[in-house]
Image (cartoon, grey):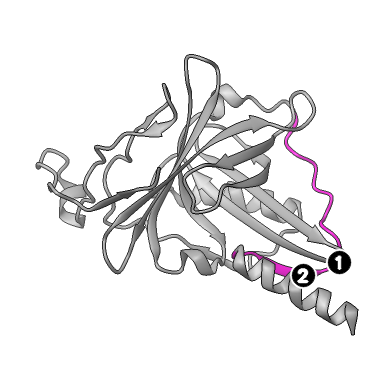
Amino acid sequence: MKTVHIILFVCFVAAARAQIPNLGFCPDYLPMPDFDIERFLGKWYEAERYFQFSEVATRCVVTDYAKAPSGRIYVSNEVTNRLTGVKRVIDGSLELSGKAGEGKLNVKYSTTPIASETALTVLDTDYDSYAVIWSCSGFGPIHAQSAWVMTRERLPSGVVLQQAYGVLDKFKISRTFFVKTDQEGCAIAASDINAANGITATSTIAEATGSEQKNANKPEEENQPVEVQN
């Protein structure tokens, strides 16, 4: 009975973290060797991800990594609520956590209701078009995984996605639970992170309509609601 309670508890925690729970221990996936954090910096758009309850109503997801003059790396995650159109920005900091040259990252989010940490593993990236990122947390015989396909372009080509799929297949990561992130009709450019002090710029670019994307010279909408957590 105690084992059943533990399993139910772990499943509850996994659901709360919006991860996919599975029986067994976390797979031992090796991070990308010779990982170059300098080339990894910049904007990455979420193309696909493991299904996550917390992101059911989100779209236009983008992550920005930037280095401050102090050398510290800051992270800014921006999502748009598909129902209200309100943007939410979650900020944090990043540290390399693996052996020298390994693609293992530790992200500390400071603007969530409760400060949290997430260990991420970069399985592979070519730095210029795609990155495959994976995370897993375990509790006894239960583990929960998350995975993301990130791309440099908001709307990547099929060739780029096939490269990312090849990485998932290499690590035998099932694409069954993957869902595409809605990036249609989003702003042409994402908001900038203020790496000098780790706080996202308060002036974010308004979400563009599909017609605005076709004509980049048209003025962007003003007064787009933005929710910045700090």
Does the magenta portion include 20?
Answer: yes
Pick out the residue farthest to the bottom. 1
Is there a contact, CB below 8 Å, between mark 1 and mark 2? yes
Quarter containing the C terminus: top left
Secondary structure state at the residue bearing disc 1: loop
Overall secondary structure of the magenta section: loop
What is the quadrant of residue 172 in the picture? bottom right
Residue 125 rendering spot, x and y as whole percentages: 61, 37
Rounded to the nearest angstrom, the CA distance separating label 1 from label 2 is 6 Å
Residue behind mark 2: 22
Q: What residue is at 74 percent from the left and 25 percent from the top? A: 101
Left or right, 222 with respect to 69, comes to left
Q: Name the mark on residue 24.
A: 1
Residue 187 rendering spot, x and y as whole percentages: 26, 47
- Does 73 sit above or below residue 45? above
Count of numbered circles in the view = 2
